[in-house]
Amino acid sequence: MACRKLKPICMADGALRTYGIYWGDTLVEGDSLASVMWDVPAGLTKIAESVNSQPVTEDGVVYPPGTVALVRLRRDAAGTYACRCEIATAQGDADSRELVVVAG
């Protein structure tokens, strides 16, 4: 399955961070994320993955529940890593996006 690649993000040495991908712009009205699975390569450790059950606010924008795929990562080694996020929606749609993490 082809995936949409997003702008790379940077992760500092020793960082433990939660990142999210907003999917609401691709969901049909009334649909929401039902499940999320993150494929994280060696060099990063996936601590947790989930769909937001509460609103998420970033840079003053509020994203409703069920629209953000979250992953908590720990940086283990320097490198550039492609983390793939696969989702399924309540109405049966499936898709994926790729988040590139640059750990310097």
Image (spheres, rainbow, N blue to C red):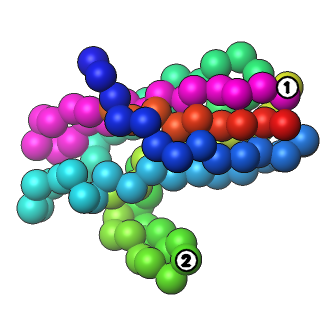
Left/right of residue 75 with respect to residue 18 in the rendered view: right
Q: Amino acid at mark 2?
A: Asp
- Quadrant of the snapshot with the N terminus: top left
Which residue range is magenta in the image?
A: 78-95
In the picture, residue 73 is in which quadrant? top right
What amino acid is found at the position of numbered circle 1 in the picture?
A: Ala
Q: Nearer the viewer, residue 91 or 78?
A: 78
Residue at 22% x, 32% y: name it. Answer: 94
To which residue does mark 1 refer?
Answer: 77
Q: Residues within 10 Å of mark 2 (few under 14, many from 20)?
A: few
Residue 43 percent across, percent down from the top left: 76, 22
Q: Is residue 27 above or below residue 63?
A: above
Give the labeled residue for mark 2.
59
Q: Is residue 93 magenta?
A: yes
**Label 2: element kind:** loop
Magenta residues, dominant SS class: strand
